[in-house]
Amino acid sequence: MIPTHLGPAEHLFSAEEVEAAIRRMAVAMNKDLEPLTPHRPVVLLCVLTGAVVVVGQLMPHLHFPLVLDCVQVSRYGAETSGGTLQWRTRPKESLAGAVVLLVDDILDEGITLRSLQAYCAAEGAAAIHTAVMIRKTRPRAVEVPVDYVGLEVPDRFVFGYGLDARGLGRNAPGIFILPRDD
């Protein structure tokens, strides 16, 4: 256990391991998306707030034209279990006919990411590619296709590198498991 401002926590991945995973995702994205951008840049949709750190580190490694935009939705707020999807910010860029790269921090139950994919499709996106920094190994409430996955974690509440626990811990240098309250 490592002391953190959220209490003692298990350190799953170091900052260096997270950054290596981001670079691996970028290599795959460049291979897949660069050929799709001869006439129009990719719309990179950062899912706020959790994916801001990942997107910031991912962008310098992407070699295709892109326009950065964001969406902000939440099912967690300051809680550790998900509730109703709340829309806070919708994209400013038109998604009609666009190749969209949707980047989220974590795939947990799949409800948020699936809703965002459906939103992009309803807005007329020509193609939707999805990336998550963290994928929990667990059964999902809904089937969610994901093209790029950085790291896999157990079915526990994790924080760090953009992911929060009760609103804190986004700046932790790596990925940590939140201690259980039992």
Image (tube, rainbow, N blue to C red):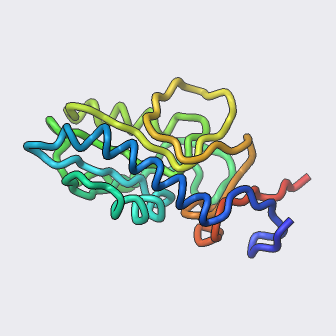
**Residue at the (53%, 52%) spot, across then down:** 21
Asked if 169 appears above or below 127 in the picture, the reply is below
Residue 149 place in picture, x, y as percent: 51, 42
Q: Is residue 166 visible?
A: no
Q: Nearer the viewer, residue 55 or 18?
A: 18
Residue at the limit of the structure toward the left, as seen here: 39
Q: Is residue 91 visible?
A: yes
Residue at the limit of the structure toward the top, as seen here: 143
Total tally of numbered discs in the picture: 0
Q: Which quarter of the picture shows residue 13? A: bottom right
Residue 63 place in picture, x, y as percent: 26, 55
Q: Which quarter of the picture shows residue 129? A: top left
Locate residue 33 relative to residue 131 in the image: left or right.
Answer: left
Residue 114 place in picture, x, y as percent: 45, 33
Q: Nearer the viewer, residue 177 or 36?
A: 36
Locate residue 113 relative to residue 61 in the image: left or right.
Answer: right
Residue 1 place in picture, x, y as percent: 86, 65
Locate residue 117 relative to residue 127 in the image: left or right.
Answer: right
Q: Which quarter of the picture shows residue 38? A: top left
**Residue at the (76%, 73%) spot, across then down:** 4
**Residue at the (60%, 27%) spot, across then down:** 141
Asked if 138 appears above or below 53 in the picture, the reply is above
Q: Nearer the viewer, residue 69 or 127?
A: 127
